[in-house]
Amino acid sequence: MKIKMLFVALALMAMASVSFGQFNAVLYTTDTFTTGCDGGDMLPDGSPVVSVYWDANNNGPDAADVIAPDAVQSVYALNGNDYLGIPGAFYTDPAFTYNAFTPAVSKFYVVVNAPSARYTSRVLTIPNAYSEHDLTGSWTCQVTAVPCDEPTQVFVNTVGGRNFLANGPYYQCVRACANTTVEICLGPLAADEYPHALVLPGCLSNGCQIDCPPAQFGYSPTGWTYNAANGTWCNIVVVATEGCFCFCLEFIEGAVDVSLTAEAGDASVNVAWSVAAENNMARYDVQRRVFGHEFETIGFGRCEQHEHLVELHVC
């Protein structure tokens, strides 16, 4: 009953003003609109997302069309609850009106812009004087943006601990949303099996061969923390812009010193140690510190192991 009364009231207003203008058109729909083509949250009443477009070249909706020029009003807010008793629908109030002239061609359509979708109505030929147009059921929907809902946690199952990387570094491309924190966890690992990893922007480098826009992020290689309860090492990547980053686990550091001997020589020291297991180390650095000074590297031993024994001569 409320709808009919409104139509009559607008019709009387239009009849009284028809001599002053070219047309008065009431456009409405009982369809409701959501944030995406396949559903989502309903757009709330009061959202100024409804626009009337002019089909300027008379060939249907395309990129050349513009919001109706010189109309009394061409952008509206959703108001379905107030006028139709249907939240998420709309009814043009005031009517879509041209007072001075009617553009040629007099064809128009309605667009509803949602966060991730663009709804477009059928094309209307609007005659002079007063008219009503029900757009219910005439809408097509085009996806304009895909909401980002990538996971915020990545788990790498490092079965075998140190031996997980026996065949070389491990790579994984991670897709991430803007303004999120992605936690990367590795396990099962022991407390002395410390991961060494790089995080690189984009995924078209090294072992990450996926074409994906690079994300901007913050990452600390020394930010790994150990959780003894579940045997995992975890770190975080703070993502600033949506895109991808490449996670590269280079090696897992193992226990080093099982036994260590040092024998003085002629202007040299012969240092030897044995390791408990193969641990994928590239080399061992030997450092010394003079009291009151920082540690300095004085030599290194390459991992040319023979029965887990490495010898280092330091001059």
Image (spheres, rainbow, N blue to C red):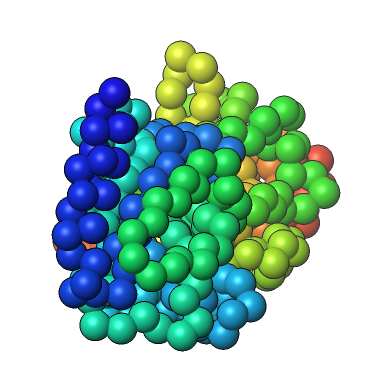
Q: Say which quarter of the image contains residue 206.
A: bottom right
Q: Is residue 123 shown to the viewer in this render? A: yes
Which residue is rendered at x = 26% and y = 49% of the image? 11
Vertical position of residue 62 compared to residue 222: above or below: below
Total count of labels: 0
Tell which of 313 and 203 is nearer to you.
Answer: 203
Relative horizontal placement of residue 287, taking residue 72 as reference (left or right): right
Camera-nearest residue between 130 and 39: 130
171 with respect to 40 (left or right): right
Rendered view: 117 above or below 181: below
- Identity of the residue drawn at 57% across and 41% down: 137
x and y, in percent, of residue 200 in the image: 54, 64
Name, please, the residue furthest toward the top.
229
Q: Position of residue 174 (x, y in %)?
A: 59, 50
Residue at image coords 63%, 65%: 212
Can see residue 221? no
**Residue 157 left/right relative to 228:** right
Pick the quarter of the image with the N terminus.
top left
Decide which of 58, 106 is in the foreground and name it.
106
Residue 230 sits above or below residue 119 on the image = above
> Looking at the image, which residue is at 18% across and 54% down?
13
- Where is residue 307 shown, x and y percent of the image? 81, 40
Q: Position of residue 20 (x, y in %)?
A: 19, 74
Left or right, 290 with reference to 116: left
